[in-house]
Image (cartoon, grey):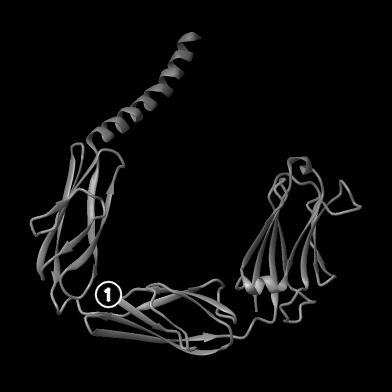
Amino acid sequence: MKTNVNLKILSFLIPLFAVFISVFLSNCKGHVEIFDITDSVENCSAPYVVYFYPDAEHRTKDLEYTWDFGDGTSSDEQQPVHIYQEQGVYKVTLSIKQNKSFDSKSISLYLTPDSTSAFSDWDYASRADSLWAPAYVEFQNYSKHATSFFWEFGDGDTSTVKNPSHIYNTEGIYPCTLSAICNGDTSFFSRNLIIKPPPADIFIDEVTVWLPSSYIGADVWVDLWYAGFHEQESSHTNSTASFPVAFPITRNLYWFNGDYNRDVLEFEIWSNLDNTAPVTTFRIESRDLQSDYYPTLISFDDGYGRKLEVKLEYR
């Protein structure tokens, strides 16, 4: 009988030991593979400031980076920044060593007036899924070889910040232009931003609830109110197995008339452990939803294990 038990233990330990040896030997040997090297060049003439970014696969320990910038200088940094004092075409080589594993890759870096002229490009992101007034817009500058920038937002405001943010307070069509400038050479890129009027409907998608473990097994539900009017009662859990619990609501606020004011949106969490009062109530004024630039997710936490998260949509 003991023999069978010992055989079972050995049959379990042998594969485990084999895996351990395989991992140990692999770590001793190391693993390195360089896929590509990308660069980002600042300035359109010498001196050129160049940022290098390796795309490589390797383990995290005992790494040795060696960069040869092609101008007689080198670096052991992972993502170095190098200044080239003269124009030209440079062979840049990256070597990575990890234990017994080694890989190397070279690229040609063109730093000439033809290849480093100023180039303007940009995109944007907003706090909401669409641009409703007031719209908080974050601009992302993808220009190349420029030393200074000039933004015209189309509403009379301007900026010289590389990646600015801007608030469009009213609806309209705004031609936004970025000028990328270097030594008198200027590149322009313009596009229209369409700012829509404030959304007239607030759609409550889903409400997620967290409560202390003392409410496990209880019947839990959410009551939704707006401006003092009862909007909807969610489904009941009947017997809560665990938290969080998600309650689909999927409806527009009936009592919201499109005015973002001091009317209060309320979420009451109820439990059958006490039918006389809600467990807790979370509130937010509709004007805060607008001044926060239409968040699609709002969350509340009372610090005592009672939390609420609400997914919103605007229409």
Residue 282 spot, x, y in % from top left: 75, 59
Residue 157 spot, x, y in % from top left: 47, 85
Q: Quadrant of residue 86?
A: bottom left
User: In this picture, is 2 found above or below 167?
Assistant: above
Q: Quadrant of residue 188?
A: bottom left
Q: Residue at x 66, y 71 (%)?
A: 289
Residue type (three-letter) at the residue carrying disc 1: Thr
Task: Say whether residue 235 is visible.
Answer: no
Q: Residue at x 65, y 63 (%)?
A: 298
Task: Say whether residue 244 is visible.
Answer: yes
Residue 187 spot, x, y in % from top left: 28, 84
Most distant residue in the right direction: 276
Q: Quadrant of residue 17?
A: top left
Q: How many marks?
A: 1
User: In this picture, is 184 found above or below 268?
Assistant: below
Residue 29 spot, x, y in % from top left: 22, 35
- Is residue 83 toward the left or the right of residue 301 in the image? left
Most distant residue in the top direction: 2
Instruction: Tell me the quadrant of the picture where the C terminus can be found.
Output: bottom right
Residue with the mark numbered 1: 147
Front in this rendered view, residue 119 or 27: 119
- Is residue 245 toward the left or the right of residue 238 in the image? left
